[in-house]
Image (cartoon, coloured by chain):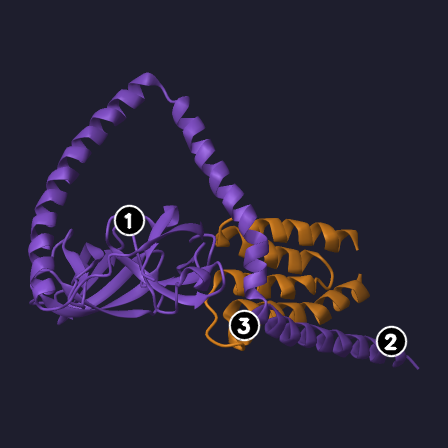
Chain colours: A orange, B purple
Amino acid sequence: MTRHVIGSIIVLLSILLLPYWIYIPVLFVAIITVPFFWEGMLFALMIEAMYTVKISIFTPLISPLTVSTLILLIILLPIREKIRLHV
Amino acid sequence: MNYLPKNRFKSLYLKRIVVLIVIFVSGAITLSLFGSTIISLVSPLWKAENALSRSLQTGITFFQSQKTLAGENMALKEKLSYLENKIMSLSKDKDERDTLLALLGRRQNSQMLVASVLAHPPQTLYDVIVIDLGSNESVSLGSEVFLPEGAILGRVSEVFGNYAKVKLFSTAQEETNAILERNSVPVTLVGVGAGNFKIMIPRDIEVESGDRILSADVFSYLLAVVEEVSVSSTDSFKEVLARTPVNIFALRFVFVTP
């Protein structure tokens, strides 16, 4: 839980204050390092809502950033579990 | 029987996937609907950040050595003189053109609003800027956005009450009709991001670094300046790279047509 809170604060601050070439890697690093970091999905959607132009209500659903975040989170689920089982 | 842990793992895995997809879909719809609320919550922080970065720049300048400042002062005086001359020559043509257009019944919208840029690239993705004017100040979808120097920058593509998002012409894959000033050749500017454009033109058309590219409407606003021209001996087209007249990473104010 602590890691989730710390990760969320770091990602949020970097989204609000830093350029995209920092906050996007920070977001992905948080997703990889924090177990089941579902908040990353919300942060990706927040980036879409704040910094990109919405064409329709479904624009965030087809955005490369949000879709890649979802895919990364799903891919990491079995990998993380397998690493834990075999250690 | 050792199937239980495996099944439990599969069940947990599926549950988590469902949770993620639910968050994804519901979050996307919710955040799309409350985009303006998010921006109004965050805007005080952006304003504070802009004010702080300006103060820091002033502070750094104060501590620079006297010699550096004297050199910089000389260079700036020379540049100022050069630009004053350039502006004078431009304004003469502009006055003539404005008079001609007025005679033809086409007048420029002189009532522009000044907007402060709250967020700009590289903080935003895809060459989008957020300004502090919205529908409450009669800014509407498609309103044109200009630099204080007069060059056109983009159009308003999303409007909220007190804020608006502007899509710059340099957004990746954004196509804009334009005119190459040197030969009055119509071209299509293709945005490549970060304030840059690309144009493909036949190799026989003469173009040089520093040439101006103007908007295709009757007012011929400055859109971009040619930076580099590349052509290989076997190609029938040449690639022209252009950029916006100012650094979009340091935008502070823009003008918006209501």
Whole-angstrom CA distance, mark 1 to mark 2, is 66 Å
Mark sitting on residue B165: none
Residue placed under numbered mark 1 in the picture: B148
Mark 2 belongs to which amino acid?
A: Pro
Nearer the observer: mark 1 or 3; the answer is 1
Q: Relative to residue A6, is residue B137 depicted above or below?
A: below
Residue pictured at 10% horizontal, 68% vertical = B185
Mark sitting on residue A60: 3
Secondary element under disc 2, as helix, strand or loop, is helix
Residues under numbered marks 3 and 2 in contact, where contact means CB atoms less than 8 Å apart: no
Mark 3 belongs to which amino acid?
A: Pro
Mark 1 belongs to which amino acid?
A: Pro
Nearer the observer: mark 3 or 2; the answer is 3
Residue pictured at 30% horizontal, 22% vertical = B68
Q: Which of A56 and B23 is in front in this view?
A: A56
Q: Which of B146 and A14 is in front in this view?
A: B146
Residue furthest out toward the right: B1
Q: In which quarter of the image is residue A80?
A: bottom right
> Mark 2 falls within which chain?
B
Residues under numbered marks 1 and 2 in contact, where contact means CB atoms less than 8 Å apart: no
Residue furthest out toward the top: B66
Residue placed under numbered mark 2 in the picture: B5
Q: In this view, does B68 lie to the left or right of B214?
A: right
Secondary element under disc 1, as helix, strand or loop, is loop
- Do callouts 1 and 2 point to residues on the same chain? yes
Secondary element under disc 3, as helix, strand or loop, is helix
Whole-angstrom CA distance, mark 3 to mark 2, is 36 Å
